[in-house]
Image (cartoon, rainbow, N blue to C red):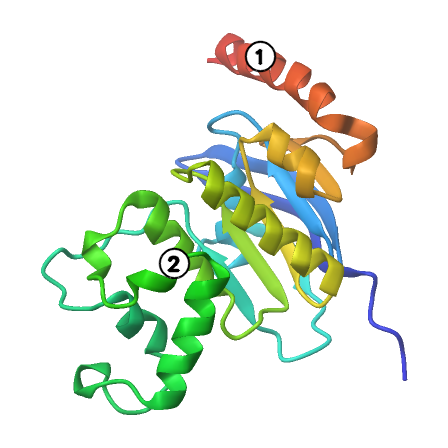
Amino acid sequence: MTDAPAALVEIDALTVRRHQEAILDGVTLRVRRGGVHVIVGPNGAGKSTLVAAMLGEIAFDGRIALNWSGAGTIGYVPQAFAVDPTLPVTVADFLALTRQRRPVCLGLTAAARSAVRRLLDRVGLADLDRRPLAALSGGELRRVLLAHALDPAPELLLLDEPAAGLDEAAMRILDGILLDLKRGGETTVVMVSHDLEQVRRVADQVTILDRRIVAEGAVDILGADGVRELLPTLGERRKARA
């Protein structure tokens, strides 16, 4: 049996255009299996566009290959998620939607309720199972979305600014989940982040993006301080091009 490629994600010459303008321009990237790969860059650098391309949500030129070794599941936490305030769905209902065949409005099975409890425990929201989804704060909703993305355990987890709106305690929970996934080695994480201290704490690899790849490498080589020094330069360069 041939060993699986070292890279779970292979991206070659990826270009995305909007109204004739290149949002991403010739991006080539490899994401190693089992680690946490963080994408950083100034606003408008194409970070969320890169994630959308990996999800197959937008048209692009170039190549994206996902070298699955298992079932090929993707978990995803978007940067923004709108909840209809009139929707009568609780947190438990939302997390149980894929856990049972019968409609959640008819009640949850014992197995679904037990699974929901475990998921909420994992993200530190054990007491919110009966709360309406629309009544959550931004940080609480983001953690519920993370719980949803982790069930079932994905081979690839895409996180677009997962720390937005999180307080210090919630950030520690997120860091703990990411480090647990890294130790387990079965889930590969690609995360967009503006929090350079979080990059230092949890990442293996970091890519600095500004429509093109500006720099990439092991986080202990680039370092959060080096990334921090480079990002303002990119922002000023962007203004000069405008």
Is 8 located above or below residue 15 in the figure? Answer: below
Residue 84: horizontal and vertical position, in percent?
16, 57
Look at the image and tell me in which quarter the N terminus lies: bottom right
Looking at the image, which residue is at 24% across and 82% down? 104
Residue lying furthest front in this view?
Answer: 127
Query: Which one is in front in this view, the residue at disc 2 or the one at disc 1?
Result: 2
Is residue 64 visible from the viewing direction of this image?
Answer: no
Q: Circle 2 is placed at which residue position? A: 125
For label 1, the SS is helix
Is 197 located above or below residue 151 in the figure? Answer: above
- The foreground one among 105 and 9 is 105
Looking at the image, which residue is at 66% across and 60% down? 181
For label 2, the SS is loop
Q: Which mark is residue 123?
A: none
Residue 207: horizontal and vertical position, in percent?
69, 36
Pointer 2 or 1: first along the chain: 2
The amino acid on which the numbered mark 1 sits, given as a three-letter code, is Arg
Q: Dot 2, how many residues are within 10 Å of its Cα: few (below 14), some (14-19), or many (20+)?
A: some
Looking at the image, which residue is at 40% across and 58% down? 145
Looking at the image, which residue is at 52% across and 8% down? 240
Residue lying furthest left in this view?
Answer: 86
Residue 236: horizontal and vertical position, in percent?
55, 10
Is 208 located above or below residue 51 in the figure? Answer: above
Residue 203: horizontal and vertical position, in percent?
70, 42
Q: Circle 1 is placed at which residue position? A: 237
Q: Is residue 216 left or right of residue 56?
A: right
CB within 8 Å, label 2 to label 1: no
The amino acid on which the numbered mark 2 sits, given as a three-letter code, is Leu
Q: Is residue 85 left or right of residue 78?
A: left
